Image (tube, helix red, strand yellow):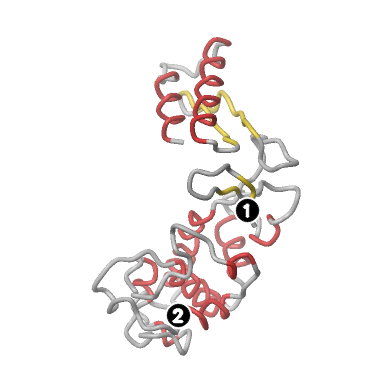
Amino acid sequence: MLKIAAALLALVAVPATAQPLTAAEVTQIDQAVAKALADTSVPSASIAIVRDGKIVLTKAYGKASERLAAKPDLPYQIASNSKQFSAMALLLLEDEGKLSLDDKVSKWVPGISGGDRIAVRQLLSHTSGLQDFWPQDYSFAAMSHPAKPQDIVDRWAKKPLDFQPGEQWQYSNTGYVVAGMIAEKAAGEPLMRYLKRKIFDPLGMKSVRDLDETNGPAFPHGYGRYALGPVRPVT
């Protein structure tokens, strides 16, 4: 994707006014994206070209799944980019006086290792010491089955801490599961409902979907590869 971005930036320098792209420019863009997809084996890409603050081209390439061609308006899962919304929910709840980022985790979710020493803000900054339930280099069998937040807490957040809270940095999806549970308790409603009411609806963000909704044939499929093997759909 960095190769695509660099190529597109080189092609589309911002002029004084938003001029439409020429056919030659579109051809160059198509060639740059096609080459990047071929070089990386990435199944699909969605791009937008902005000139002078205006979108002058949206286009999608490749396949979103084995049955679905990529389209510019097709919503893709944003995976861990969603963490910024969980963090914003907690910041909003602090503004509302419903919690403090300095609260200890044990105040909201009992039974977590070190919960009486981990501050809510340390969950957000990946400095809690909670072990990450998703190793960054592989997926294990249990990850292909649905799990409730409490299931993840029971399996991963009750293990010994990897380090004392605040002493190190280590990416932890587990910490953000706990953060989401705290947000729900403080808000008194499901996290997605709170985010919809406080962020998505006011900003007119209509493409937002709950994760469970996107595991179906109308949405893009996840892909992966083992070592240097072929790219293939994953569960």
* Position above or below: 29 against 65: above
- What residue is shown with label 1? 234
Residue at 49% over, 35% down: 40
* Position above or below: 188 against 142: below
In this orientation, which residue lies closer to the viewer: 115 or 232? 232
Image coordinates of residue 76 in percent, x first then y, are: 61, 47
Residues at marks 1 and 2, CA–CA distance in whole angstroms:
26 Å
Q: Quadrant of the C terminus?
A: bottom right
Mark 2 neighbour class, 10 Å CA radius: few under 14, some 14 to 19, many 20 or more = many
Image coordinates of residue 179 in percent, x first then y, are: 46, 72
Mark 1 or mark 2: which comes first in sequence? 2
Q: Quadrant of residue 146?
A: bottom right
Disc 2 is placed on an element classified as: loop
Residue type at the position of mark 1: Val
Residue at 53% over, 19% down: 31
- What residue is shown with label 2? 157
Image coordinates of residue 181 in percent, x first then y, are: 53, 76
